[in-house]
Amino acid sequence: MGRHELEYPKDATNTVKRHDERGIYALRTIHELINASLILHISFNTEGSPFPTTLPMLGQMGSFARPSSSTGDPLDLYVHGYVSSRLMSLGRKHSDQDGQKTETGLPVCVAASHVDGLVLALSSFSHSYNYRSAILFGYATLVTDVEEKNYALEQITNGIVHDRWSHTRLPLTNAELQSTSVLRIRIVSGSAKIRTGNAKDDRDDLQNDELRDGNWTGVLPVYSSIGTPVDSDYNKVEVPAHVSEFIEEFNRESREYCVEAIKKK
């Protein structure tokens, strides 16, 4: 019997309502979408402003307490930023003195989106995207433990390019650690929404031969691609295997997914 997939419980915050058949609550799917996103958008409220603030940031899922956990397990989200930035200052303000997980913390919403295809139909109303999106809700507190801070920065660095951390100058200097803050976001809820397949039109339009004879329908695959590496002015070595292998894997998986997504119903 296969392992049971853990899910975030449905509630008023995370339940997908429009096209609820596209809603996914499995931790693994949601966490992998977050980790695969080059940019996360983190939203939070600030005192004195009627508008929520949304910032583009880097982040990775992980568990310092259980480093062997998989993406299908309950995880925290780690993000980093300059020590005196607004989000880090708010996270510090909302943290306990020891920075441990509690019910306190800065409430945040985290969003990740991937566009996989432009769906062109007979009717403009039926145009769409193939996409993968994920939302997480949680509470952000400041990481004060040096070991956990290094763990989080390693996860974020390896989220840029696999195994990059071990190919950098280590350890980080005290100045680097002091100028960078890390927030641990304790996730309490989340969901994903995914659209796959080809174009879909109403029956009346499909029965209109004149309309079908004069208009192309289908999907334009969209995928990210990493180009040829460009050396820095001070570089002295060839492109290492961990980088070239990452580029090959990233480009192959990006292309394959968007094409396979079109075939799914």
Image (spheres, grey):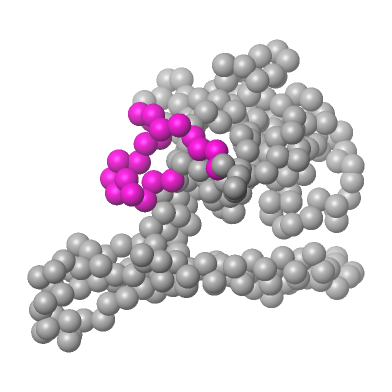
Whether residue 213 is situated above or below residue 3 in the rendered picture:
below
The image quadrant that residue 249 belongs to is: bottom right
* Residue 120 in view: yes
- Please report the residue visible at 57 percent of the width from the left and 20 percent of the height from the top: 105
Whether residue 248 is situated above or below residue 160 in the rendered picture:
below
Quarter of the figure with the C terminus: bottom left
Percent x, y for residue 178? 79, 31
* Residue 111 in view: no
Q: Which residue lies furthest to the top in this view?
A: 97
Residue closer to the observer: 109 or 232:
109
Q: Which residue lies furthest to the bottom in this view?
A: 213
Whether residue 216 is situated above or below residue 6 in the rendered picture:
below
Q: How many labels does the image show?
A: 0
Left or right, 246 with reference to 255: right
- Please report the residue visible at 76 percent of the width from the left and 38 percent of the height from the top: 67
Q: Which residue lies furthest to the front in this view?
A: 1
Percent x, y for residue 128? 31, 62
Please identify the dominant SS of the magenta region.
loop
- Please report the residue visible at 89 percent of the width from the left and 46 percent of the height from the top: 170
Residue closer to the observer: 72 or 146:
72
- Please report the residue visible at 12 percent of the width from the left and 83 percent of the height from the top: 209
Q: Does the magenta stretch include residue 18?
A: yes
The image quadrant that residue 66 belongs to is: top right
Percent x, y for residue 6? 55, 38
Left or right, 204 with reference to 119: left
Residue closer to the observer: 199 or 243:
199
Residue range highlighted in magenta: 5-24
Percent x, y for residue 81? 66, 37
Q: Is residue 249 magenta?
A: no
